[in-house]
Amino acid sequence: MKKSVIEAMKARRSIRSYSKRPMHHAAEGQLKDYLRHIEHPFDARIRVELIKTGEYPGNHRLGTYGVIKNAQAFFAVCCDRSSFAEEALGYAFEKVVLKSTQLGLGTCWIGGTFNKGAFADAVQLKADEMLPIVSPVGQASAKPSMVSKTMSRVTKQRSRKPFETIFFSDNWNIPLTQKSAGDFGIPLEMVRLAPSSRNCQPWQVLIAPEGAHFYRMAPRSLNRIDLGIALCHFDLACQELGIDGGLKIMPDAIAHTPENGFYTMSWIRKEA
Ligand SMILES: Cc1cc2nc3c(=O)[nH]c(=O)nc-3n(C[C@H](O)[C@H](O)[C@H](O)COP(=O)(O)O)c2cc1C
């Protein structure tokens, strides 16, 4: 039976070792259909291509410097250069990751360790596009490789910051617990479980009567992708739970930006 999106968020892990079996035709067809139009709420252009390594003439160059083992296929994720392109990429590609999880396939966001030139060739990257992310996709191997175990240990892959250190109510002096977060308890827990570069979890969220304001607590452009992933988890969880609202830029929220932080965007409740 198909997992709900919230179940997929709970089940997803970064997978770095794959079985050599090719992807099932039905799953490949569903993924290709899904990639044709990935809905997201940003004014940015995102393109995700599925590359089967066996069909690409320069396949030996589609490398990840040993981080990923036996991938039979990769997603290459491109975006334009508009002002919210990285956040949009984070949101849109996390939807693809969750769809893959629902189809029983493993993935792993890769933002640093890949041969950019080879992947850019494979997708015929255009002059107005960037290619910040690739991900393997396929059946997880029954036995994780040594590199996979090391990466998992180095990034403390399974650990997450405590709820009350990243989510607050009204101001930054009032920590929230999942219980005191009311109907936002599950959506915030889904943010907490989201993947992030080096597992840095660079988000803080301020809950107010009108909704939730998201702040980025790290400066790199990969961290903007991380915030897009967090917004995706929050928005999709609210949709699945029937909590009405959507993403918006709220200029008033900028005044509440914590020290060393950057305001990203807000999720605003729909007025009844
Ligand atoms: C934007 C982004 C970039 C990432 N880049 C890499 C990478 O270059 N190499 C890698 O092995 N993992 C990479 N990861 C995976 C993270 O290390 C992983 O998501 C984190 O440790 C949490 O583990 P989990 O995904 O199993 O929950 C990246 C994740 C994100 C979101």
Image (cartoon, helix red, strand yellow):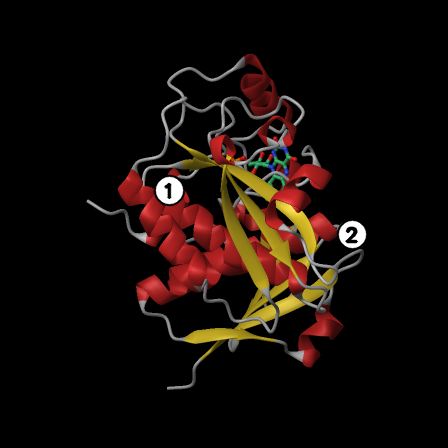
According to the image, label 1 marks what residue?
Answer: 101
Residue drawn at x 29%, y 52% as measured from the top left = 4
Decide which of tag 2 and tag 1 comes sooner along the chain: 1
Within the image, what quadrant is residue 214 found in? Answer: bottom right
Residue drawn at x 64%, y 51% as measured from the top left = 124
According to the image, label 2 marks what residue?
Answer: 219
Q: Residue furthest left?
A: 1
Image x and y of residue 269, in percent: 46, 77
Residue 128 lies left or right of residue 181; in this view the side is: right
Image x and y of residue 146, in percent: 56, 13
Image x and y of residue 171, in percent: 64, 66
Image x and y of residue 89, in percent: 59, 57
Q: Is mark 2 within 8 Å of ligand 1?
A: no
Quarter of the image with the N terminus in it: top left
Which amino acid is tagged 2?
Pro
Residue 226 lies left or right of residue 271; in this view the side is: right
Which is in the foreground here, disc 2 or disc 1? 1
Count of numbered badges drawn on the protein: 2
Residue drawn at x 67%, y 34% as measured from the top left = 114
Mark 2 surroundings: few (<14), some (14-19) or many (≥20) residues within 10 A: few
Which amino acid is tagged 1?
Thr
Ligand 1 visible in quadrant: top right
Quarter of the image with the C terminus in it: bottom left
In the depicted structure, whether residue 226 falls above or below residue 82: above
